[in-house]
Image: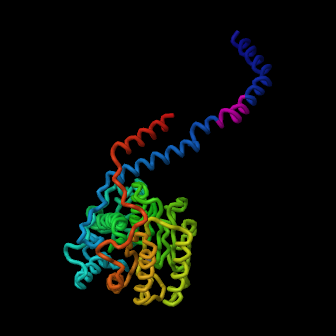
Amino acid sequence: MTSSCFNFITYKILLKLPINLLTLIILSRWLALVEYPFWKRMTQPSDSDTHIDQKMSALKDKRRVRDSNLRIFASPDQYPIVYSSKYDVTFYGLEKMHPFDSQKWGKVFRALKDAHFLTNHNYVIPNEATREDLLLAHTSAYLDTLKQKHVLAKAMEVPLVGYIPFFSKFADSFVLAPFRHHVGGTVAAACLALERGWAINIGGGFHHAASEKAGGFCLYNDVTIAIRFLLQGESIKKAMIIDLDAHQGNGYERAFTDDDRVYIFDMFNRNAFPRDEEAKKGINLAVPLKRFTEDEEYIEKLETHIVQAFNEFTPDLIVYNAGTDVFDADHLGCLSITEDGIEKRDEIVFKKAADLEIPIVMVTSGGYTEDSANIITQSILNLKKKGLLPLTKTQKPKTDTPKPKTEKSFDEVEALAEKIANL
Ligand SMILES: [Zn+2]
């Protein structure tokens, strides 16, 4: 009985085998043609999803700017020069393992005091950037990786430091905190430049840091953060970066590649670090220089191309990266610009900003010799001597200082975005 039943079932299956196969083929084709694309649509973000994500991300950034305490008020008797004694990086002498003089910022400040330009009261002290401020330019995952001592030591280009016992215990206060003060300084200086026509952060200019990774002694990209701070806060509509450090500014070039509100003019040693081809897509006006370029050619190229930059773009703010590693004796920059050439260079940029009545903020960026602090100091004193750093505002910025956004207007925009997201 059992055997007969089994034979019967087998017979029925065999009889229907061609029909079953045909059904399977039709079903699989239908799944491939209809269901799979449907599933794909369900699981992959559409253009409208991406658009909503971008809107939500922009709103988060606006909230960060609204809640930030990096915007600093300066009294009329204070120069818009920003500095904190917390800029210098010290770690029991081990910082000397790096070719970068990590105490040059303090040296510049003290030299400007010795020259009777700055006093203990006539400059501006910035606040330290918070994690929320840093998220304007960096991913949360990247900021978390900096808590790992070996990642941080490698980012600082002193990997051996990562093997020091208890390094991670002190890394935040000894290494990361100074750089967060530099970020605060560049944001504060950029805000002050809009009010006063010019500003200088004695630190800042960490132009190799990208959103998700460090590079070349740069952990946080203070310039990207400052520009996003002003754009998202609607203090400016357009910015120009003039990068005259010896190295290509690949961090912010990657950040602003698809952002036509930011124009980047970069003059750099084409043979030096980082030679980042992908980031070069973010440069609007690139002037690659050959090794050991000297003053005459350097100044001629600057004068020609700075005219071209402003013919192509009219910003509300200039961010000037005044790296001094173009100096003749700087082995990492490998250019041959003299101290006089650097003074002339900075003067050309500040004079152009003054002539065009466009606010300018300067950051000091690279410079890796014992002479770097003195070169920065002498150039700032030269700018003062030439009347380019007035205490009272003589320029008329193109953009008025914005009124702070009210809670009501922000909440209205946020509610509208949530409505869109719920559609
Ligand atoms: Zn450099």
Q: Residue at x 38, y 61 (%)?
A: 400
Q: Residue at x 63, y 35 (%)?
A: 38
Number of numbered tags placed on the structure image: 0
Residue interval drawn in magenta: 27-37
Q: Is residue 93 above or below residue 146?
A: below
Q: Is residue 137 visible?
A: no
Q: Magenta stretch: residue 111 in it? A: no
What x and y, as percent, mark residue 285?
A: 56, 72
Quarter of the image for residue 327 reads bottom left
Quarter of the image for residue 368 reads bottom left
Q: Nearer the viewer, residue 344 or 40?
A: 344
Which quarter of the rendering shows the N terminus?
A: top right
What x and y, as percent, mark residue 232?
A: 42, 54
What x and y, as percent, mark residue 346?
A: 42, 81
Q: Nearer the viewer, residue 337 or 24?
A: 337
Q: On the picture, is 175 further left or further right than 327?
A: left
What x and y, as percent, mark residue 251?
A: 47, 66
